[in-house]
Amino acid sequence: MASIFSRIVAGEIPCHKVAENEEFLAFLDINPKADGHTLVIPKQEIDYLFDIEDALLGRMIIFAKTVARGIETAIPCKRIGVAVIGLEVPHAHIHLIPIRKESDLFAGKSKKKPEELTRIAALIRAQLA
């Protein structure tokens, strides 16, 4: 069965898209730890980040770096924290989380209204254009 992320890639489930190319997709987490909390995924369904072929993984990190720079510009923060947890969805993904202090990475998740997620995604996309 396809993961929820594969269904997002296929367009079966909507997302608040931040960036996309032929290999990767970045979209807002619907239960973010902070405004701008973004997930970066390969479009190819691969369960574990470290199972990704080296060249593809390198391109994924470069894609994530570009997205992180856009988030930094759009969302007031000190840094973009990076987390690779990988258990909640069986599809490799990187969390990019705007932080002001390290403990922000471990904060609880929040619920955001779809309109707010749409606004935040647009702010980040504008920085990537």
Image: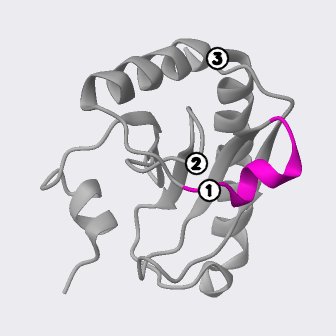
Q: CA distance from mark 3 to mark 2?
A: 16 Å
Q: Quadrant of residue 78?
A: top right
Residue 117 is left or right of residue 51, and the answer is: left
Badge 3 element: helix
Looking at the rendered image, the quarter that the N terminus falls into is bottom left
Please give the residue where the numbered disc 1 appears in the rendered image.
Answer: 95
* Residue 102 colored in magenta in the image: yes
Q: Residue 74, labelled with which disc?
A: 3
Residue contact at pointers 2 and 1, CB within 8 angstroms = yes
User: 121 above or below 1?
Assistant: above
Is residue 7 toward the left or the right of residue 81 in the image? left
SS under mark 1:
strand
Residue type at mark 3: give it: Ala
Residues rendered magenta in the picture: 100-108
Residue 9's quadrant in the figure?
A: bottom left
Q: Percent position (x, y) of residue 35?
A: 56, 32
Query: Which residue position is annotated with label 2?
Result: 33
Quadrant of the rendering where the C terminus is positioned = top right
Q: Residue at x 50, y 47 (%)?
A: 32
